[in-house]
Amino acid sequence: MQTWDAITSRRNVRSFSDRPISREHLDQILEAGRRAPSSQNTQPWGFVVVTDRAQLRDLSTVWVGAKHVSSSAATIALVISDDPEPGRRVQFDLGQATMIMMIAAADLGIGSGHAGVGDQAAANRLLGLPAGRTCSFLIALGYPSGRPLAPISKPDRKPFDEVVHWGTW
Ligand SMILES: Cc1cc2nc3c(=O)[nH]c(=O)nc-3n(C[C@H](O)[C@H](O)[C@H](O)COP(=O)(O)O)c2cc1C
């Protein structure tokens, strides 16, 4: 795909086919995340990749909005220090890593879906995190079970002119 096609094709996919994602493609998505920019290049993240079906099922229970993790081919857990330095833009940094991995996935025809974490203790335990680390967010990945990714001409978004202001608000 061209970059613009990947951007306009990305949407939250919450229903995945049984098709696995190759290690090469998973590595490419993760490499995109590794290259993401962060405040003062602190790279406050670690990525735990889960592909085991039983572990994915367990992980899908950590949040009411994480059910799609269960049928994903792989889920990337974004892990941060549970005591980030004050003033650091850790959540902003995670957003950058998330988006670039989602675009890299879309470029390969792979769907992605955000999932938050509600039961923090369960997520940390399932991922085997050491003390001082916590799972902030999950990105479920897989080939869409329904329609494949394709550019969306009319996205469910506010109108361009309502969002964009030139020069002054
Ligand atoms: C910070 C953040 C948290 C989100 N958490 C969840 C979630 O827990 N479960 C879920 O199904 N979708 C989640 N989403 C996906 C949004 O609902 C989705 O991006 C939005 O409705 C726009 O849809 P689209 O991504 O298909 O364009 C989250 C998105 C963001 C940016």
Image: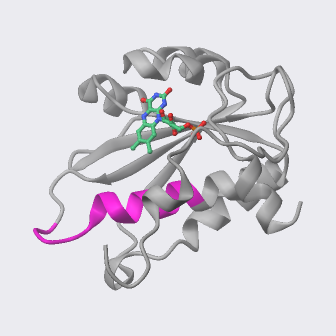
Foreground of the two, 134 or 150: 150
Viewport quadrant of the N terminus: bottom right
Q: Position of residue 41 (x, y in %)?
A: 39, 82
How many discs mark residues in the rendered view?
0
Foreground of the two, 90 or 159: 159
Side (left or right) of 132 relative to 160: left
**Residue extending furthest toward the left:** 86
Q: Position of residue 81 (x, y in %)?
A: 25, 56
- Image colouring: one colour
Foreground of the two, 40 or 106: 106
Whether residue 59 is visible here, answered yes or no, is: yes
Residue sitting at x 66%, y 42%: 155
Side (left or right) of 45 relative to 119: right
Picture quarter containing residue 40? bottom left
Q: In this rendering, is residue 37 above or below 55?
A: below
Viewport quadrant of the C terminus: bottom left
Q: Position of residue 131 (x, y in %)?
A: 22, 45
Residue sitting at x 66%, y 40%: 11
Q: Position of residue 135 (x, y in %)?
A: 35, 41
Picture quarter containing residue 145? top right
Bounds of the magenta span? 85-99
Q: Main secondary structure of the magenta part?
A: helix
Q: In this rendering, is residue 140 above or below 34?
A: above
Whether residue 27 is visible here, answered yes or no, is: no
Residue sitting at x 86%, y 66%: 2
Q: Is residue 96 magenta?
A: yes
